[in-house]
Image (cartoon, rainbow, N blue to C red):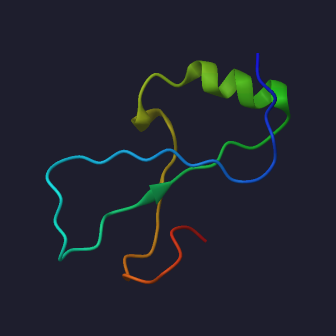
Amino acid sequence: MFAIQTGRHCDWVRYGEPQPDIPATVRHTRIEGSQIAKLERLSQVQRFADLPWKSCPTDWTAPLCR
């Protein structure tokens, strides 16, 4: 068992070869609720597509997520 803390936690996944001249496509998702609700939701996740993803800005210097 682990304590779910407030704040941000990020995991990164890259597919394909690096393309240094093209900004990466970045998406994020958030799981909200009590510790019990979050653990329940996480227990249902089997693949990335099981979560609702939002796209982040694609500008080189934009914040990753808003």
Q: Relative to the observer, which residue lies in front, 26 or 9?
A: 9
Where is 37 relative to 53, above or below? above
Q: Quadrant of residue 20?
A: bottom left
Q: Quadrant of residue 41?
A: top right
Q: Position of residue 58 (x, y in %)?
A: 37, 76
| Quarter in which the C terminus is drawn | bottom right
**Residue at 77% across, 23% down:** 2
Where is 56 relative to 9, above or below? below
Q: Relative to the observer, which residue lies in front, 42 or 13?
A: 13
**Residue at 50% across, 44% down:** 11
**Residue at 38% across, 83% down:** 59
Q: Position of residue 38 (x, y in %)?
A: 74, 31
Q: Position of residue 36 (x, y in %)?
A: 82, 24
Q: Position of residue 8 (x, y in %)?
A: 69, 53
**Residue at 81% across, 41% down:** 5
| Quarter in which the N terminus is drawn | top right
Position of residue 29 in the picture relative to residue 23 (left or right): right
Where is 26 relative to 30, above or below? below
Where is 9 relative to 42, above or below? below
Q: Quadrant of residue 48?
A: top left
Position of residue 14 in the picture relative to residue 53 (left or right): left
User: Which residue, as the protein is rendered here, is positioned at the far top?
Assistant: 1
